[in-house]
Image (tube, rainbow, N blue to C red):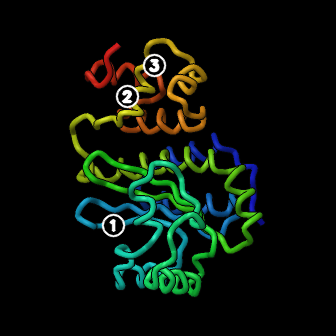
Amino acid sequence: MLKRAVNLDRVLEDIDAATALEDLQGVIERLRDAFGVDHMVYHWVDAGGDQYGCGTYSDAWVERYLCRNYLRIDPVITGCYQRFHPVDWKRLDWSSKPARAFFRDALEHGVGNQGYSIPIRGPNGQFALFTASHNGDDDSWSAFTRSSGRDLILIAHSFHGKAMEFQPDRQSDQARALSPREVDAMTLLAMGYSRAQVAKTLEISEHTLRVYIESARFKLGALNTTHAIARAISRGLIVV
């Protein structure tokens, strides 16, 4: 049964309390149960193709995925790599023979026929996905993603930020570059615009704006939006 009432503050506190990657495995298992989905997974890939993650897929599927180098043909990876916004698996291209074979294999290993993946990008070519997957009908899944998508986005970025704390060798000591949209959003906020005014100026939804702000905050290592603006100004990333 898919659940749509999750205490977001409690979830974010749970993530923040993690002190090692092993703790995040417990967090993601609790998230799976809280949202009532079959699986939840965090999958990280660097520019050289190295990958790691945590999640609730079976050990057999994880081993098979790595041994068969499915990273090369996985439509979820290839389809999300150039995207910023979350992607419902139904909107990806599964038409090729390798993709269809991969999907059949995934179904046989209990991955689920529905999925919702949130792309997360790092400053040095890193690429991560936070995914919820489930076996169910289209209508129920669409209702779930509509009601839970916003929370999943915030959780994904929070989860990624915490995971990166435990991988200091995978991070740059230099200030992370903000994307053009993040610069626009932070600049307008620094000028005193409200979030509604920023969203209207950039012609995006307030929901999308929040994703940009959270992404910038994590890149800057800031405690909140005000702190992020101050850091961006002090580092010359935005000019007001």
| Residue in the foreground of this view, choosing between 18 and 201 | 201
Q: Residue at x 39, y 76 (%)?
A: 73
Quadrant in which residue 28 is drawn? bottom right
Judge depth for marks 1 and 3 and give the one in front: 3
Q: Is residue 207 visible?
A: yes
Q: Tag 3, which secondary structure?
A: helix
Residue underneath mark 2? 183
Whole-percent x, y for residue 34 in the image: 69, 58
Name which of mark 1 and mark 3 comes first in the sequence: 1
Q: Is residue 59 visible?
A: no
Residue underneath mark 3? 188
Name which of mark 3 and mark 2 comes first in the sequence: 2
Name which of mark 1 and mark 2 comes first in the sequence: 1
Quadrant housing the C terminus: top left
Q: Residues within 10 Å of mark 3 (few under 14, many from 20)?
A: many
Which residue type does callout 2 highlight? Answer: Val
Q: Residue at x 54, y 34 (%)?
A: 210
Q: Tag 1, which secondary structure?
A: strand
Q: Residue at x 67, y 55 (%)?
A: 145
Q: Residue at x 75, y 62 (%)?
A: 2
Compute the Cα span from label 1 to label 3.
36 Å
Which residue type does callout 3 highlight? Answer: Leu
Q: Residues within 10 Å of mark 1 (few under 14, many from 20)?
A: some
| Residue in the foreground of this view, choosing between 108 and 160 | 108
Residue underneath mark 1? 51
Compute the Cα span from label 3 to label 2.
9 Å
Q: Is residue 3 above or below residue 189?
A: below
Compute the Cα span from label 1 to label 2.
29 Å
